Structures are given as structure tokens and as C-alpha cells.
Image: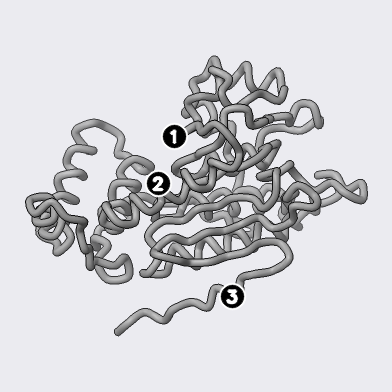
Amino acid sequence: MAQAQPDYSTLNSELIKVELKDYIGVITLNRPDIGNLWSDDVAKEVINAFQTLDGDDLCRVMVITGAGRIFCGGADFRGGKDFASRNTTYPTGEHYLLAREGNGTLALQQLRKPTIAAINGAAIGIGATFPLNLDIRITHRKNKIGFVFNRRGINLEAASSWNLPRLVGHARAMGIVLRGDIRAAEHPSLRPLWETLVEAPEDVMPAAMALAKEIAVQASVVSNIVNKALLLHPKDTAGQQSHLEGTALFYLGGSADSKEGVQSFLQKRDPKYTSVPSRDVPPFMPWWSTPDMSKGKYKL
């Protein structure tokens, strides 16, 4: 049975725009007049859009960018709202903010298909941290990047205390976080964050779309789902990981996409992959477990 096609026009709002074209899903933060500031409502709509695209067999790659000159200028504190004013307490003593942060981050980390952050303008605070949960980041050399949390009297969020040192190294992460300054994307401490650094803001989205097209056309989406999971959810030892790779290789090696990949290579043409996630993802996935972040279940 063919999968029902989502109506992406229903996801468009004053906060975000969503479209799917040529197997590429694009989410655009759509409040350029206020620097695409992040809010609970923005987070909900972005995550819903990502999850909808991730579940659509016609989507192979997802890209997020920002309308206007700024990618995301940070959290929306207009009206004097701070984090404490939004931090209501559950009867169990757990905090809404804790669960909300965990669920939002977990949702990004659970996306199966390749994700690209096209950071076309300044990325400050949450604008710098949430893209660390995505697979590939592209920006321009002089772009302003700020992990400014200590200068707002708060701590890192969106799993950035986990992601940042793993991406740039522990020593660099310490310098970035404890100074809390705004740096150019080409700064040596930030360079490991980027797959590509382009010269100008207007070059960011074309570069991201070119990369997305390359992935969508040249790579099997099911193969990408498996390879992404292998990197993000490794086993405890090299031996266990090798066994897992062998299990996956045995499954994918007999697939229609594997046969097409070999034939297209030998015939020197673009492949025409036919596998789809809803039908062809290996049955042993997921091999990992995820925490239950629902109300009353998550404990520090």
C-alpha cells in the first residue's frame, strides 16, 4: 500500500515554512523581523515538521535555515520572560523545563534521515546549540556564532554540553563556553563544527541544497538511515560494533538498492534507488534504547 502523502501547506505558519521538493525537505525559520528568535511554539513546530518529513518516504534529506539575515538570534525573552518564569513544577518535584528540553533534543536526535543546518546568519544561544544535534552544518566564514549562556546567567542546553566537546574537543569547548563570547565561524575553535565554510551569507543555502541534492540522488536513503544509526548508536566495543556492521551488511547487501548501486557504478550513471524507509529499513532497528522523557518518568 502506498504511503499517504503529507500536506506540507498545513505546516506553514507565521513561525516556520515547510516544503518538499525533489526529495529534499526544507524548513525555514520565518520570523526575520525579530531575528528568528526561538520559543516553545517555534520548537514544537520545527520538531513536528522534522518528524513529518522524516516519516515521508518521498523525503530523503532535510534542511533547516532562517529567513532574512539571521539564522536564529537565541531565545525569545521579549516581555521580560526568563527561564524561571517558565519553569513550573510537577507534583513529583520534576520540572517542566527539564522534560521539555529533553524531549525536544531527543526528537532531533531520533531523526533517521540526514539533516543539514544551513546557518545563513548569526546563530546565538539556542541558535548555536540546536544545530549540534543535526548531522551536517554549513555556514559562512565571517558568521557570528555565540555560546553566550554564562553571560545570561544560565547553563548550556539542547545537549550542547554533550555535543560540543565531542565535535570540537574538550579544551576548545571549555574556551568557547567559559568565555561565552561571539566568534567568527572560521575561528579555529569552531572550525570542526562545519562540513563546509562558504565565503558569503548568500552562498550558504545554495551550498546546502547542492549537498542535499547530492545525498538525495547519489545515496540510498535506507543505507543512510543505517549508516547514521551506526555512527550515533555504537556498541560498547569494536568487536561488538564489527558484528553489528556485519549484520547490517548481510541485510543491505542483498537489497535492491545495493544491486542498483553496483550497476549504476559499473554503467557510470546516476542510481535510481527504489527502497523506502517505511518498507525496507532492517527489522533489527533500533538496536538501542532511548530514555522515557514523559511526565513523571525521567529522573536526574
Of residue 224 and residue 260, the one placed in the foreground of this image is 260
The secondary element bearing badge 1 is classed as loop
Identify the mark at residue 9; answer none if there is no mark.
Answer: 3
How busy is the neighbourhood of tag 1: few (under 14 within 10 Å), some, or many (20 plus)? few
Quadrant in the rendering for residue 267? bottom left
The secondary element bearing badge 3 is classed as helix
The secondary element bearing badge 2 is classed as helix
Residue beneath disc 1: 195
Mark 3–mark 2 Cα distance, whole angstroms, equals 25 Å
Which mark is first along the chain, 2 or 3? Answer: 3
Which mark is first along the chain, 2 or 1? Answer: 1
Q: Is residue 49 above or below residue 176?
A: below
The answer to whether the residues at label 1 and label 2 have Cβ atoms under 8 Å apart is yes
The residue drawn where x is 53% and y is 66% is 19
Q: Type of residue at label 2?
A: Leu
Foreground mark, 3 or 2, reads: 2
Q: Is residue 158 left or right of residue 114?
A: right
Give the image location of residue 263, x and y in percent: 9, 56
Q: Is residue 235 left or right of residue 112?
A: left
